[in-house]
Image: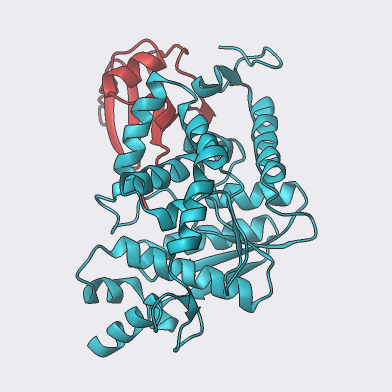
Chain colours: A cyan, B red
Amino acid sequence: MKCKRCKVPAVVALPSHNTGFCAECFDLFFIRQVERGIHSEKLFTKEDRILVALSGGKDSLACILVLKRLGYDVTGLHIDLSIPNSSEFARGTVERFCEEHDIPLIVKEMAKEGLAIPDVKARLNRPICSACGKIKRYFFNKVALDEKYTVLATGHNLDDEIARLFSNVLRWDVGYLSDQGPMLEAENGFARKVKPLFRLSEFETANWSFLQGIPYHYAPCPYSKGASFTSYKKLWADLEEEMPGRKLAFYLGFLEKGKAPFQRQEALTGDTLAPCTSCGYPTSAEVCGVCRIKDAVAERK
Amino acid sequence: MSEQTYEPAPYGVTVTLEPANETRVMQVKTVLQMLNQLQIRPTTVLVIRDGGLLTPDLKLQHGDKVIVRTVVSSG
């Protein structure tokens, strides 16, 4: 297979674009996809202070590196979940990466917040993934607001977005469908949230990370076995192989035609948010979910 | 002087699956043939040989050492 642009041997084959690229031309393709996504959805500008959530995986590290290369003002944020035989490797990967690329980094330790994930898991009677996600989102937002960042970026890729959209469609969850997309404006105590890699598949970010020499952390979370999003990704991999390009078309079609009706319905019937009486974080209940988890963990100790 | 014994390497391509870190030796001629035998879709893994990426159409040879690394993050 030859590179579509320069005809030297290709190193990445992209059936969804019916093409292949050498390392240099794939880098150009990747950068252009990110720029196109930023500009088409007006995610942010060079004036914004961007906080990028870094898990240590390929997507988040690729996200911050590509934004830095494009000249944006970026700082990394790592949430140390205190999961044995996992968190220390993820944190080490992030710390080494940021030092190597001269990227400022903030680390927030959940053990110090009374929210070490093993303690939360021991207290909950439901799967830990949703609680862990809730805690991470809470601190992403809190640090962004406390430290005066204007944008919070995550490394969610097209496959993540498709899996989430598919899950929300299966449940016809109007609330989640109304605000799904690569950009969520700042409002009601929430920072602006963006997903600059939304046009790129997991395969594409993995190839770019490899070619950039990013030593990412790829061991799965020891608690994530059976996560439903992984099953949805497999289903979509089957569909994408039969119909290359279907993922991006489905997602862009939702943004163009599907999202607005859900936004209108949510504006009429959705929950109203008020500050949590304990921490001030916006919530539809009196006390927010993270404060309730923290109280439950403290009671057990 | 002690007599040294040599064990011949198994014939074929040595494939390491990551992150499981399982290794197997396969009699395959191309990357696509290897992935088909492993029942893996080409767009769900990186195929790495000598530190470089391989596309599915490329040929493999006896003695090659290949890493097949899944790209799907699972939490």
Residue A188 placement, left or right of A34:
left
Q: Position of residue A152 (x, y in %)?
A: 61, 62
In the rendered image, the quadrant that contains the N terminus of chain B is top left
The residue that appears at 40% across and 17% down in the rendered structure is B31
Q: Position of residue A13 (x, y in %)?
A: 53, 21
Residue B6 visible in the picture: no
Q: Nearer the viewer, residue A122 or A213?
A: A122
Residue B18 placement, left or right of A209:
left
Q: Quadrant of residue A27?
A: top right
Residue A184 placement, left or right of A135:
right
The residue most toward the left is A125
Q: Nearer the viewer, residue A208 or A295?
A: A295
The residue that appears at 38% across and 78% down in the rendered structure is A115
- The tally of labels here is 0
The residue that appears at 59% across and 47% down in the rendered structure is A62
Q: Does A217 sit above or below residue A73?
A: above
Q: Does A203 sit above or below residue A11?
A: below
The residue that appears at 44% across and 83% down in the rendered structure is A112
Residue A153 visible in the picture: yes
Q: Does B7 sit above or below residue A109?
A: above
Q: Position of residue A227 (x, y in %)?
A: 29, 51
The residue most toward the front is A268
Q: Position of residue A37 (x, y in %)?
A: 65, 41
Q: Quadrant of residue A296?
A: bottom left
Q: Nearer the viewer, residue A50 or B52?
A: A50
